[in-house]
Amino acid sequence: MDLRKFLRGDIDTASRVLDYQPFILSDDIETGAAYSWLRGSDPRTEPALVLRRKEMDPADWRIAVDTNARLRAMYEDILDEIAVRFPGQTLLDVACNNGYFPVGAEIRGMRATGIDLGNYGPAVQLLNDALGTQARFIHASYNSRTHELPDIGQFDVTVMSAIMCHLPDPLYFLAAVGKATKRALIFWGQLVETERLLISYQPPHPNLSSLPDFPHSFNDNTRISAGMFKEATRQMGFRDVIEIKPKPTWLTQLVVPRGIPLESELGTEGSRHVALIAVR
C-alpha cells in the first residue's frame, strides 16, 4: 500500500510498527520483505524490513523498490479477486502480520479480522487511523500442539498466506481453518507440483518458532503437494480449487530463500508459489 498521502507526517511511528509487508511510507522509506527474500543471507531470520534510501546503494534501492512493488501488486490483485468473488463478506487472515490483507479487504467493503502470534495491534491501528478502516486485530494464533485455532467464530473467507510453511502439522492446520470457514479458503505459498499426496519438510530451523521439541520443531519450508491440497480441501467439503493466475507484475518464482533446494530434491516435481481459492 502507498501510505504517502495518509500518514499525515507520522512516518517515524509507521517505520516502527510496519515492517514485513510492502508499504510505501515516503519517497525515501519503504517496508517489506521482498528485497530480503532476494538479497538477504538468511531472510527468514535476519531480514532488512525497513528500507531507507539514504542507507542503501542507489542500485540496491531501485531493486528494493521494484521487488516491493511486485509483492504489493500481487497482494492487491489477490485482494481484488477476493472482494469481487465475495463482496461485503467477512474475512479472517490467519497470521495477518502488519494487517495488509484485513485492511485491504476493509477498503474493498469487506468486514475483516486478523490474528497473529506477534502483537501487530499497533500496526493495524495505525493503518485503520490512516485509511479510515475498521479492521479488527486479535492477538492469538493457531496452536500446533492442540491443532486448534482460537475460538473466534466462523468467517466467510479465510486467508492463509505464507504461514503453512512454518507449521509442522499442515493437514491439521487445514482442518482447523476449514472449520472456521463458511465459503472459501485463500492460500498463498509454495506447493510441490505433483498430484501425488506428499508433505515435504526442511530440517528444523532454530530461530523460526518457540516450539523446539519434536515434532513441533519442523518449522521451515513445510510444503504439501498440489494433489494433497486438492484432496484435503475436497474432504473438507470444498468443491473446487481455483488458481489466481500470476501476472508479469508479480513477484513470483524469485521468492525462494537462498540455500533451500527445491527441484533437485524431488526430481522434476519442484515447487512454485501459487495463489489458490478453495470454494465450498
Image (cartoon, rainbow, N blue to C red):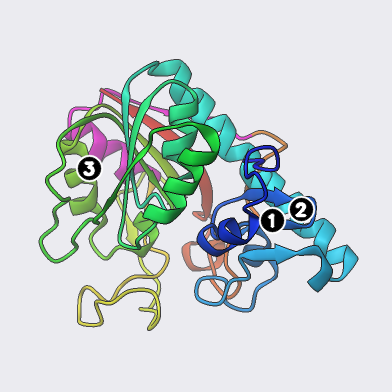
N-terminal of the pair, mark 2 or mark 3, is 2
Q: Position of residue 97 (x, y in %)?
A: 42, 54
Q: Which residue is mark 1?
A: 30
**Residue closest to the far front:** 9
Q: Are marks 1 and 2 in contact (CB under 8 Å)?
A: yes
Q: Is residue 167 in sight in this rendering?
A: yes
Q: Position of residue 110 (x, y in %)?
A: 39, 24
Q: Which residue is mark 3?
A: 177
**Frontmost residue, 211 versus 172:** 211
Residue 65's tag is 2
Q: Residue at x 54, y 57 (%)?
A: 18
Q: Nearer the viewer, mark 3 or mark 1?
A: 1
Few, some or many residues within 10 Å of mark 1 (<14, 14–19, 20+): many
Residue 123, magenta (yes or no): no
Query: Is residue 115 positioned above or below 47 on the image?
Result: above
Part of the protein shown in magenta: 226-246
**Residue closest to the far right:** 58
Q: Is residue 121 left or right of residue 269?
A: left
Residue 238, magenta (yes or no): yes
N-terminal of the pair, mark 1 or mark 2, is 1
Query: Is residue 278 positioned above or below 251 on the image?
Result: above
Which quadrant of the figure has residue 170? bottom left
Quadrant of the image containing the N terminus: top right
Few, some or many residues within 10 Å of mark 3 (<14, 14–19, 20+): many
Helix, strand or loop status at disc 3? helix
Quadrant of the image containing the C terminus: top left
Q: Amino acid at mark 1?
A: Glu
